[in-house]
Amino acid sequence: MNKKFSEEELLETAESGLFNLSCEELKEIIKTESKKEYENINTNLIDLCFDILAAKENYDDALPAKKATHKKIKMRNIIAVATFIVIIAVVTTVSAQYFNFNIPKEISSWIEGNAKTEINLKLADTTADAYSLKDSDLANELEAQGVSPITFPEELIKENSEIIKIDNITTDSTISLDIYIKFNYNNALGTLAVSQYSEDFEWTGEMVDMDVLSAEMIKVNGMDVLIFEHENNCTICYKDNFTTYEIYIETDFETAKLFAQSIK
């Protein structure tokens, strides 16, 4: 991904008027840009909007003298993740009476509607017990592209699910192999982004899920799997050794949970 914008660049942005946009307007810019095919996305614009959002969230009356940290990796490698993890939901007010955030705060915390998750998942279980779907067509296809072993929801390859396309979006195989899968599950659109890194990189910062209605961490196949509910969709993330998984699915929380529970 491109470098983080400097304070000087943010100052120039403020002078141009972009910094005066509301957080909602900035998120809408990111959302609109990320809906494009990934090869046509303006990654500089998305990065800039992220930096401005971070500045707005962390400083009251002035532009930042320091920077909030968030994951800055190759944008093409994780554009699917950017699409469905960070910018997918509209702003929603949630009553604390009905809100449930059942994830240990050391792993992920809910702050003003957004979930901020420790990017390396250090305190989560990140080793799969088994790879029971290794003989499936999907696992074989990914292995042919160099991604193996893999642990994914069995529901993804059942009759009620259709894989629409599989794209290899790797840009630097010495760092990671990156696969983007688009699918339809029970007539609900979904995507799966898989990144298998060449080594255990130590990233700085946090993953941010915006406008979270509820969240839960469940144990599946030996791993801690995080499920976040947004309005009209859910996101699921987990990690197995050097491989990260990010799932977006346009369904309700209970269906997303059942989908995640089929990981093998």
Image (tube, rainbow, N blue to C red):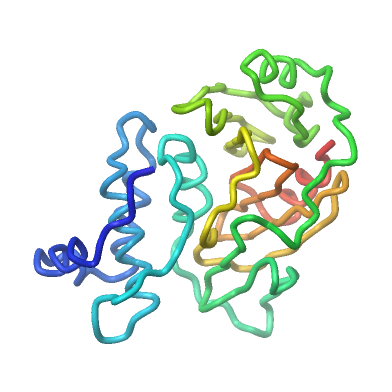
Image coordinates of residue 153 in percent, x first then y, are 77, 36
Image coordinates of residue 225 in percent, x first then y, are 75, 53
Count of numbered circles on the image? 0
The quarter of the image holding the C terminus is top right
Residue in the image at 56% along x and 22% along y: 166
Residue in the image at 89% along x and 40% along y: 129
In the picture shown, does residue 112 fall above or below 195? below
**Image side of residue 119 versus residue 43, left or right:** right
In the picture shown, does residue 149 fall above or below 83? above
Residue in the image at 67% along x and 20% along y: 142
Task: Please tell me which residue lies in front, 7 or 181.
Answer: 7
Q: Quadrant of residue 52?
A: bottom left
- Residue 155 seen by the camera: yes
Q: Quadrant of residue 37?
A: top left
Image coordinates of residue 242 in percent, x first then y, are 68, 40
Residue in the image at 49% along x and 71% along y: 92
- Residue 209 seen by the camera: no
**Image side of residue 142 versus residue 19, left or right:** right
Residue most extreme to the left: 16
Image coordinates of residue 1 in percent, x first then y, are 39, 43
In the picture shown, does residue 93 fall above or below 49? below
